[in-house]
Structure formats: structure tokens, C-alpha cells
Image: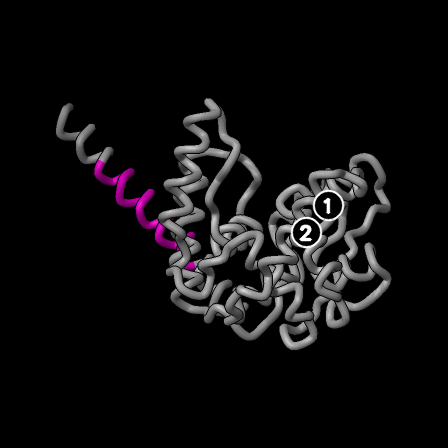
Amino acid sequence: MLKRIARWLIGAFVVLSLMVAAFQLYLLAHLIWWRSHNPAMTAFMESRLSLMRQAKPSAKLLFVWAPYGKISDNLKRAVLTSEDDKFVDHDGFDWEGIQKALEKNERRGKIVAGGSTISQQLAKNLFLSGERSLLRKGQEAVITVMMEGVMDKERILEIYLNVVEWGDGVFGAEAAARYYFGTSAAQLSASQAARLAAMLPRPRFFDRNRNSPYLARRTESIEKRMHLAQLP
């Protein structure tokens, strides 16, 4: 009886391992494809659209792809300054940033900082749900490693700037530039770029609270430092 149970457990473990490996290969295939093809939709975009359509069935996302060369360097520098100032140097993880985030969360007694890099944020947005769990964080880490292995930094940043959320149903630099400033992503000024970067990672909140004193202070801080950002 015990031998039968042991064989069953071993068989179940093998099957589960093969399923997990197949899923990772499925994700890797997508990443390899996206080295030269632009994602039309991400898991996070699909989730947001589904929620929007519960309230309004005809709801649509504002999303227009802009090639890397047609996104203002001002925005690239502002976002790197705000979200990941070690982007060009790290392997997908900012270990110092993660340690600081853990210490801050411990002091506050709750999760107030994540320490996620742009690569980690993109991994989550492309494939994963918004839930917080150790399993999801583990999968995020695996995707990040694969992404850093098959894409260069410029491509990672290009995709991130095109799929990141910048308001209620507003995704990507081009849609955000048109929505907030009536201009293109290529024409964003330093102050406009800094303001968009300051809205991350709470874009829907700041879409509703555009006169927030915090947003103004954060924008000013980013604009003062963004010239130091190193582009890939």
C-alpha cells in the first residue's frame, strides 16, 4: 500500500514538474517573439478592460504603440529616475532597493514599498494578475530572469513605456501624452515627462487628483534629477 502511494506521489510530482516546465517554455516563447514583435495586449491591460466593461460594456483602452525612437528622451530619463535609476546596470533585480523596501515595510508594519525594477514590473504586467502572493512573486522573478536573458535593455524599456498604465484605461507613452497634454510622446517636454513619471505607480489616483500637492513636489524632484539618468 505504501509503495503504491509512493509511486503515485512520484508520478504526480513528475507530471506537475512537466506542466510547470511547459508553462515556463510557453512564457519564454512569448518573450522571444516580443523581441521583434510588439505586444498587442498584456495580462494587466486585459484585467483592467474587463473591470471597465463591467461598469460600461462599450469601454475601450487608450493605447497607441510608439517606437523607442519616437518616445522623448525626456520621458525615458524621467521614468528611469522615478522608477529604476540602476536600470542599465542591474540584471533585472535591484538588491539594494529590495533591502531598503523591506526595511521600510518593517518600520511601517505594512507593505508600502516594493523595490521592483522596471524589468520586474514589466514581467508582472505582461503575464500576471495583480494579486500579491509568494507564488506570484516567484513567477515574476523567473519571467524577469528570462526577459533579461533574451531582450536587451532598450527593448525592455521600449515595451515598458508602451504598456505601463498612465490613467483610467490609458496605457503607454503615446496615449498618455495625447490624453494629458494633447501632444505626442516624441514631443514631451522635461516638465511634462517628469509629471507623467511622478504619476507612477498610482496613475488612476493622480488622474483623478491632478492638483495633488504631492504630485507637484514629486514632479519637481524628478525634473531636477532626470538629467543624471543613463539611457540604454
At x 64% / y 47%, what residue is drawn?
200
Q: Quadrant of residue 208?
A: top right
Residue range corresponding to the magenta coloring: 10-25
Other residues around mark 1 within 10 Å, as few (<14) / some (14–19) / many (≥20): some
Mark identifier at residue 220:
2
Task: Kindly identify the amino acid type of the residue bearing the numbered disc 1.
Answer: Ala
Depth check, front residue: 163 or 218: 218
* Residue at far left of view: 3
Q: Quadrant of residue 196?
A: bottom right
Label 1: element kind: helix
Give the x, y percent position of residue 217: 68, 44
| Residue 33 in the figure: left or right of residue 24 | right
Other residues around mark 2 within 10 Å, as few (<14) / some (14–19) / many (≥20): some
Instruction: Examine the rendering and report whether any part of residue 53 can be seen.
Output: no
Label 2: element kind: helix
Q: Is residue 221 magenta?
A: no
Mark identifier at residue 216:
1
Give the x, y percent position of residue 136: 45, 40
Task: Kindly identify the amino acid type of the residue bearing the numbered disc 2.
Answer: Glu
Rendered-image quadrant of the N terminus:
top left
Q: Is residue 23 magenta?
A: yes
Q: Are marks 2 and 1 in contact (CB under 8 Å)?
A: yes
* Residue at far bottom of view: 69
